[in-house]
Amino acid sequence: MHCTQCGAEVPDGARFCAACGANTFGTTATVARTRPLAVTLLAILKILTSLGWLLIALLFTFAWQGGPGKEVAFAIVGAIFLAIALVAALCAYGLWTLRPWGRVLQIAFSCLGLILGFPIGTVISILILVYMFQPGVKVLFSGRPVASLSRAESEQLLALSKSGAATGMAIALVAAFLFVPLAGIMAAIAIPNFLNAVDRGKQKRTMADIRSIGTAVEAFRLQKNAYPDAETIGDLGAALAPEYIEVMPPTDGWQHPLQVESNGEHYLIYSFGKDGTGTSCENGPTTTFDDQICFADGEFVRYPEGTQR
């Protein structure tokens, strides 16, 4: 502490300044607005939470299936989770830089966590709320210069800096024993589902592209009274583009070249599937992403049906 009268350093607990005799009531604590360990940990946890919400947003965005109505609904839900992820990232930045709105956003997230995170999230949220409503934390996030703080506010800020390590360790231990295992479980469930959703999107894109090519081939036949002769997707593109199809898709959703067998009487367009191997176009449904998708003479003869793996 320093005396406001002469600037001399005054030991903690002293009632008078030894240099000038002033009452220590007029002293102020030597404090600085620095980020405590607890706030640093909260910012890190919040950015990890943001990444989790982002993963869920991507899962919903790519997991659409069924008709256009479902596609729009899933996209809307994905957009909502993306917005939550962005707000969580903004909260992390606000905590890291000690912005007043960073504390407000953290309190809002913790209030939601009391209910939505029951029971594990509730315990963490209570600890965070207790910390966020400490007088020293309010001063820390007030945005006011240290020189403008009152003696009481300075002492609150000083007390916070002394107790920050213990509080930070408490939050870290709770997060380690409660939050981290939960995050691991969520990741174990979400990541495979996300990868499956991505493959499902690629499969649907492949079918849409093959159908577009088939439509162009049928249009060619209506005018020429025969199907085009082609052994590769490039040969077929030369015969159809741009008159019958504006852009010929050269590959399937997994970036494997589309396969073509076409003569004057019949044609076959197919994808090798996810693994990029195989030549069978046996009629019937498929159950894995590795199976071929085949379109012959105006219809799918080998196609995905039911849950894919």
Image (cartoon, grey):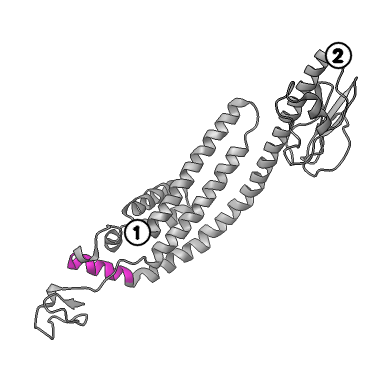
**Disc 1 and disc 2 in contact, CB within 8 angstroms:** no
Picture quarter containing residue 303?
A: top right
Q: Quadrant of the C terminus?
A: top right
Q: Earlier in the sequence, mark 1 or mark 2?
A: 1
Taking the spot 80% from the left edge, 18% from the top edge, the residue there is: 220
Quickly name the residue at label 1.
98
Q: Residue at x 22, y 65 (%)?
A: 153
Quadrant of image for the N terminus? bottom left
- The residue nearer to you, when weighing 31 against 166, is 31
Q: Nearer the viewer, residue 151 or 120?
A: 151
Q: Farthest residue to the bottom: give it.
A: 18
Viewer-closest of 25 and 222: 222
- Crowding around mark 1 (Cα neighbors within 10 Å: few <14, some 14 to 19, many 20+) is many
Q: Nearer the viewer, residue 48 or 275?
A: 275
Q: Is residue 67 above or below residue 162?
A: above
Q: Mark 1, mark 2: which one is toward the viewer?
A: 2
**Cα distance between the residues tagged 1 and 2:** 74 Å
Residue tagged 2: 225
Q: Magenta region: which residues? A: 149-161
Residue 164 as seen in the image, left or right of residue 68: left
Residue beneath the point at 24% across and 74% down: 30
Disc 1 residue type?
A: Leu
Q: Position of residue 253 (x, y in %)?
A: 72, 38
Is residue 54 magenta-colored? no
**Residue 160 part of the magenta-drawn span:** yes
Residue 71 shows in this picture: yes
